[in-house]
Each structure stands twice: as C-alpha cells, then as structure tokens.
Image (tube, coloured by chain):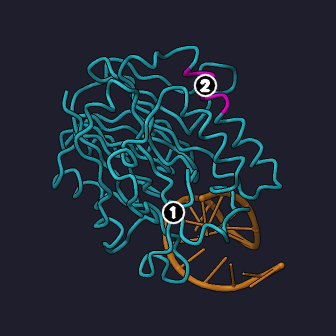
Amino acid sequence: MKIATYNVNSIRRRMPLVLNWLRQHGPDVLCLQETKVTDADFPAAEFKAAGYHASFRGMKAYNGVATLTRSQPERVLHGLFTGPDNEDFRIIQTVIDGIPIINTYVPQGYQITSEKYAAKLLWLKRLRHYFDEHLDPKKPALWLGDLNVAPAPIDVYHPERRVNDVDFHIDARNAYAETASWGFTDVFRKLHPTRVQYTYWDYFRKAFENNWGWRIDHILATAPLAAKCRAAEVDLEPRRAEGASDHTVLWADFDL
DNA sequence: ATGGTTGCTTAGCAA
C-alpha cells in the first residue's frame, strides 16, 4: 500500500499538480491538508474521474482536509467525537482494509506567547487521548499529515535560531512526542535515521532554492505496520513545479 | 526586530 501526504495550500489552486502526481505515482491513498474550500465546492468529481474516491471536510478560506482513496472507505470519521471536535476542519479519519488512517492538519500556533499556541498544545494532547480511548497500538493504524512540528534539530535549518518558533519550540516538540509515543513510529526517520530532508520551505527569500526548510509533514505507523514499511521518501518535484505549494509530497510504501 | 511571498477575499489575516 502506497500512501502519501501533501499540504496543498488551496486544492483549487493546486488541482493540476495533484492530478499530475496521482497519474504519475498511482498511490492507494493521498491525504491532503489546507484544502481551503467548502464541502459544496470540493472538486470530488474531478478526482472521481481520475479514479479516486474523496472523503473531505472543509470551510471557506482556511483549513480543510481530504483523503483520496482508490476504493470507497469502510468508514469515514470527522473530528475526535468529543464535543466541538465534530466541527473540526483539521482531522478526518478513513478506514481502508481495516486500517484507520488519521489525516490531520495540526494547528500551527502563530506565536509561542499566543492563545493559538496553547490551543495547538491542547489539540495534540486531545489527539493522544483519542488514540488512548479508540485505537490499539498493537493493531495497524496510520497518523499522517501536516503535523506542524519539526521533531528534532536535524529537522529544521538553523535549529538554534528556531527555538522560539511554534513548530520547533520545546513545548510543541514535547506535545508531539507525547502523542506519538502512544505507539506511533515516524517511518521516514526510521528508514533514514540521519538524513536531512525537509518537506516545507516558506515562500520568502528563495527558501526552497537555499534549502532553508522544515520537516513538519510526517507519516507515522503503529508497530505492526511500521515493520512492513519498505520505503519512505520526499518527492521534491511538486515543490519545484510552477505554481507550487509551500509544502511538498511525502510518501511511504507498506508490504501488506 | 522586521521583512519577505502566496492564497483567499477584497484590506487584512493566515501561514
């Protein structure tokens, strides 16, 4: 099973790149974040024509997630099912071949002194609680998406200058680690323990050309699935392309 | 300390 994640920064803007990537790589699953479109305007028909079923939840202008699958999912779950999360536009779970696939766009947090940052830390904590209550770390499951955390110094350019950034601050890294430690393994880092490889470069100051980036998009698998991961790679082509998102595609292949 | 760019929506926010 080949599964990929891509923060598209507007699906309508990125439609040609996404369709091209699907044609070239034929993944079984593609998880999208920052679709920035209401459900009524989501381009489901175009994906259907390309051979993919789309599960999605979005809103106007911001946020929004979608999971594209070859087959119709057995289940589609929105939010965390605890209070207001049923209105959450940052998480969608699809179940394919009995495997829960949790696609998330973790809050970025704005600034470490802001309420948004506190909300980010809480969001990760509540996700951990969801895993505790609803999933089994001994069974196959995937958590992936734009997780807005660079887990270690190797995962960001000039880490010493980034200690107060919301995607690298120690509290965000600890919150992420605490949630992942429920039973998830970062399959890219497992397969490439020392590789410097980013998934996001901001639009400013030729950051991509200079490789001033961040590894903040991740694919995490429970132990039985992580053991079957045979490849995990970042594809730089979608970031090089004309009209690129500020993120690029991360994919992983599992022997099932 | 601030700016730089892109997207959505229409001047300003979010990233």
Residue furthest to the front? A194
Which stretch is magenta?
A: A125-131
Residue beneath label 2, please? A86
Q: Are marks 1 and 2 in contact (CB under 8 Å)?
A: no
The quarter of the displayed image where residue A237 is located: bottom left
Q: Where in the figure is residue A4, as x and y percent of width and height?
A: 32, 45
Residue at (25%, 54%) from the top-left corner? A19
Q: Where in the figure is residue A201, as x and y percent of width and height?
A: 48, 69
Q: Where in the figure is residue A246, as x and y percent of width and height?
A: 46, 66
Residue beneath label 1, please? A214
Residue at (37%, 37%) from the top-left corner? A67
The color chain B is rendered in = orange
- Name the subunit of mark 2: A
Mark 1 crowd level (few <14, some 14–19, many ≥20, 10 Å Cα): many
The amino acid sitting under disc 2 is Asn
Q: Is A12 or A183 nearer to us in this picture?
A: A183
Look at discs 1 and 2 and give the one toward the viewer: 1
Determine the secondary structure under disc 1: loop
Q: Is residue A43 above or below residue A226?
A: below
The quarter of the displayed image where residue A102 is located: top left
Q: Is A227 or A73 nearer to us in this picture?
A: A227
